């Protein structure tokens, strides 16, 4: 008989171990989370780790299972094998049915457990509940079974049935009641009926009113039920029962933060003065200070934490970036070099920051060294862009191009990005013909790159090759029909040259359909309407574009339409505002000069 029980156990365990249940996407199901209790944390942005409690699994030590005395018959063996094969094939309904039959026939808790897990994975929650009840019936001392049953019951808001199980579980180990209240919080998160859940928690917590974790559980349930006042009172009561409990203090701060960051910061500051060793709370306090843009105080808090954990990369990086925000570049430089010594997860990002800091310190040679040290990865193009940017500012366009051409990354996409970067510095330098030729040569070997084709089209516009522009933009649209800016660029180019205005408007409207709130496409629509003589309609779209983005070229178009409508002082005001922000914009300045000249010529 013992051997037969062992054989049955082998099949039950093989189903559990060899064919794990499919993962459940919690965003698509109301089924509860995996059955492992962990301490609940306060909601974002405050996410503490409780230092006073150590979450544990429900079953902390092996124990003898109450296995039935039965004969392993052929039909039982067949059903177990059928269930295993069905799970492997994803036929979970068949597997659940077979496992439930075997569980009811054998009263083996291992089979009932597996039936519960498979039904849960298949999102058959009512069936999973039935299986969990069988598991609990066959193994009444199993904390794992009780936990699973509770999770399912609470997820379905079956609080009356859940209450007896929770009260029994809490009473079994009174000395662990606090820890168990924390563990229960993970089950509570699965319930949709937050009001009923709050009432349930208050009932089960009543006999444990002097346990801080019980008050904390009430606070969390009240918060979820939108009872802010009760949440605040219960969290404060938890702190009375356990002064200095940083988890409860962070929860109080979270409640205060809903009304005011200032109140939350003041509360955390007072708490830290009374409990300076609450380092997890101090970390959250520092992060909240950053959100409030109090960079000076935030840096002081991070520095204090760094003294406690001098090898902590996150702290050192926080101090470095805060120092950059405060324009304290010398400290930022020192901290970033320290971060590099601590083996950060993304050392190239640190090198880019070091380059930026040294640019600010006017140490261009040092900055070039840091940018040059980035040889691959996600920071590669950023680093090379800043490298050549320094050279171009120094009037060394030829050297910048030579540097880029000397780089030969193995990745084809990176090589293409370097070509685009070279064309960009040529365009910015006004070398439009050279940019056009460079991109044209690149398209020979990269006929399917929409980025390259689009940039080639933009370069063609600068050298008045509308034919090349149109061919390449139509190719972009063919390859990527959702490319809103390809439609817009082609439509605007035609409109700006007073060509095929009906078609130009259709293209721009298609672009706007794909990207409804794009200020540049709205500007294009306003401009083509202006070309069609529809000034009032044009004004509507241009005002909206300018409201979304104060841009010099949008201002030039808006001002011109206002000018045509006779609202010249309003036009001048908009131009003046735009010139303050972009004094060298060629289109804006030429528009103002042209219209003012026309005005002078037409004056009596």
Image (cartoon, helix red, strand yellow):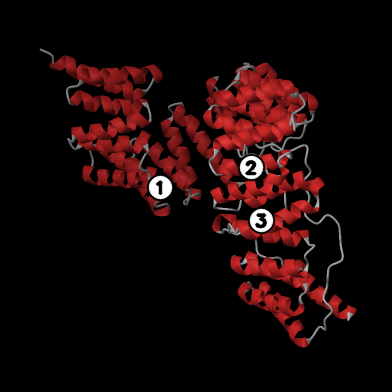
**The disc label shown at residue 201, or none:** none
Camera-near label (1 vs 3) is: 3
Q: Point out the tag, 2 or 3, that comes first from the N-terminus.
A: 3
Residue 266 lies in quadrant: top right
Q: Are marks 1 and 3 in contact (CB under 8 Å)?
A: no
x, y (%) of residue 604? Answer: 10, 12
Q: Nearer the viewer, residue 16 or 130?
A: 130
Up-down relation of residue 575 to residue 257 (above or below): above
Read off the residue under disc 3.
163
Q: Which residue is mark 2?
A: 218
For marks 2 and 1, give the CA distance: 52 Å
Tag 2–tag 1 contact (CB < 8 Å): no
Give how far across and how far down residue 597 sits, in percent. 21, 17
The furthest residue to the right:
2
Seen at 71% across and 46% down, the residue is 207
Mark 3 surroundings: few (<14), some (14-19) or many (≥20) residues within 10 A: some
- Eyeballing the image, is 231 above or below 559? below
Q: Is residue 184 left or right of residue 12?
A: left
Q: Quadrant of residue 165?
A: bottom right
Where does residue 484 sit, x and y in percent of width and height?
38, 45
């Amino acid at each position: 008989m013992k051997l037969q029980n062992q054989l049955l156990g082998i099949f039950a365990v093989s189903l559990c171990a060899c064919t794990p249940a499919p993962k459940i996407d919690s965003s698509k199901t109301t089924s509860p989370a995996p059955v492992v209790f962990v301490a609940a944390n306060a909601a974002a942005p405050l996410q503490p780790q409780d230092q006073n409690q150590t979450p544990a699994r429900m079953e902390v030590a092996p124990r003898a299972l109450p296995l039935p005395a039965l004969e392993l018959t052929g039909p039982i063996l067949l059903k177990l094998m059928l269930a295993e094969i069905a799970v492997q094939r994803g036929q979970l309904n068949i597997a659940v049915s077979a496992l439930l039959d075997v569980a009811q026939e054998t009263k083996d808790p291992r089979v009932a457990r597996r039936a519960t897990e498979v039904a849960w994975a298949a999102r058959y929650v009512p069936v999973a509940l039935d299986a969990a009840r069988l598991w609990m019936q066959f193994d009444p001392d199993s904390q794992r079974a009780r936990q699973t049953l509770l999770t399912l019951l609470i997820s379905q808001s079956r609080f009356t049935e859940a209450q007896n199980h929770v009260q029994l579980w809490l009473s079994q180990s009174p000395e662990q009641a606090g820890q168990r209240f924390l563990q229960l919080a993970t089950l509570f998160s699965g319930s949709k009926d937050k009001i009923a859940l709050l009432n349930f928690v208050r009932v089960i917590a009543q006999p444990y009113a002097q346990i801080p974790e019980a008050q904390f559980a009430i606070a969390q349930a009240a918060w979820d039920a939108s009872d802010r006042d009760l949440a605040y009172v219960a969290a404060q009561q938890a702190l009375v029962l356990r002064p200095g409990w940083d988890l409860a203090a962070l929860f109080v701060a979270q409640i205060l933060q809903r009304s005011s960051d200032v109140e939350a910061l003041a509360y955390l500051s007072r708490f830290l003065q009374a409990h300076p060793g609450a380092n997890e709370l101090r970390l959250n306090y520092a992060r909240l200070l950053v959100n409030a843009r109090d960079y000076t105080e935030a840096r002081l808090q991070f520095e204090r934490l760094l003294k406690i954990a001098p090898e902590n990369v996150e702290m050192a990086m926080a101090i470095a970036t805060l120092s950059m925000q405060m324009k304290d570049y010398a400290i930022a430089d020192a901290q970033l070099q320290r971060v590099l010594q601590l083996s950060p997860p993304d050392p190239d990002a640190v090198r880019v920051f070091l380059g930026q800091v040294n640019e600010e310190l006017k140490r261009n040679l040092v900055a070039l060294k840091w940018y040059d040290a980035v040889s691959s990865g996600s920071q590669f193009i950023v680093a090379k862009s800043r490298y050549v940017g320094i050279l171009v500012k120094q009037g060394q366009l030829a050297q910048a191009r030579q540097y880029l051409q000397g780089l030969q990354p193995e990745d084809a996409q990176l090589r293409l990005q370097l070509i685009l970067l070279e064309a960009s510095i040529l365009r910015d330098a006004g070398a439009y013909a050279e940019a056009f030729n460079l991109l044209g040569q690149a398209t020979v070997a990269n006929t399917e790159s929409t980025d390259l084709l689009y940039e080639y089209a933009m370069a063609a516009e600068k050298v008045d090759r509308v034919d090349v522009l149109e061919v390449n933009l139509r190719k972009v649209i063919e390859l990527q029909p959702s490319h809103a800016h390809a439609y817009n660029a082609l439509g605007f180019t035609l409109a700006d040259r007073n060509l095929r205005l009906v078609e130009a408007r259709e293209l721009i409207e298609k672009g706007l359909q794909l990207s409804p709130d794009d200020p540049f496409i709205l500007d294009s629509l306003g401009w083509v309407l202006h070309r069609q003589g529809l000034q009032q309609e044009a004004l509507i779209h241009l005002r909206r574009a300018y409201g979304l983005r104060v841009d010099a070229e949008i201002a030039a178009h808006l001002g011109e339409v206002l000018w045509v409508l006779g609202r010249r002082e309003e036009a001048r005001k908009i131009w003046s505002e735009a010139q303050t922000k972009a004094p060298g914009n060629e289109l804006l300045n030429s528009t103002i000069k042209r219209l003012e000249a026309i005005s002078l010529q037409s004056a009596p």
